Image (cartoon, rainbow, N blue to C red):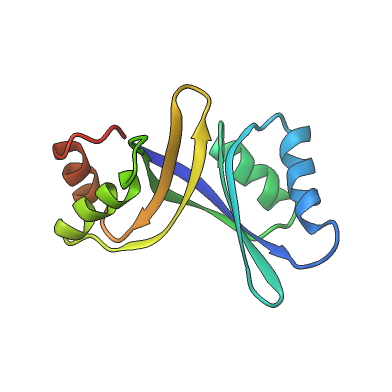
Amino acid sequence: MIIKQITVLAENRRGGLKEITDLLADGGVDMKALTIADTKEFGIVRIIADNAEKAEKLLSDSGHLCKLTDVIGVKIPHRVGGLNEVLGVLCDAGVNVEYLYAFLSEEDGARVALRVTDNEKAVKALTAAGFSL
């Protein structure tokens, strides 16, 4: 399944991340997943929300540099090597994974958000291999 992800540059300072979460909470946006990668001056905040377009508008209207990106959501089998199986399918299909992060689903366990070089090819390969997107 293709999911819209919001990527936000957050200044590395006290309260910077809270400003982002305040905006989303006050705007009624529910975050489903969040990851942060830091650089010296900024954090790269990636968010999956129940309403990505609304989240992006709230953040950009308040002056935050952000953009929407398509990622793939994949259900990970609950067994040793589950993620490895997903990565093997993508590797065999010639799809490079740029980054990924895991999160839990309230319904039934682990999910991974994958940013890949070719969404269409990845979705086709994962679906053919029997993975739930």
Q: Quadrant of the C terminus?
A: top left
Q: Return the x and y of residue 49 as percentages of the image width and height.
A: 57, 37
34 vs 64, nearest the viewer: 34
* 58 shown above or below 97: above
Residue in the foreground of this view, choosing between 34 and 62: 34
Q: Residue at x 39, y 51 (%)?
A: 114
Instruction: Find residue 111 and report its horizontal and vertical position in percent.
Output: 43, 38
Residue 24 placement, left or right of 110: right
Q: Quadrant of residue 76?
A: top left
Q: Residue furthest front?
A: 80
State the residue lying farthest toward the top.
107
Q: Is residue 109 above or below residue 3?
A: above
The quadrant of the image that shows the N terminus is: top left
Image quadrant of residue 73? top left
* Residue drawn at point x = 79 percent, y = 58 percent: 16
Q: Residue furthest right?
A: 14
What residue is drawn where x is 19% and y is 37%? 127
Q: Image quadrant of residue 51?
A: top right
**Residue 55 drawn at (x, y percent):** 63, 41
Direction from residue 79 to residue 39 in the image, left or right: right
Residue 74 horizontal side relative to residue 29, left or right: left
- On the image, the x and y values in percent for residue 50 come to 56, 31
- Residue drawn at (80%, 49%) of the image: 18
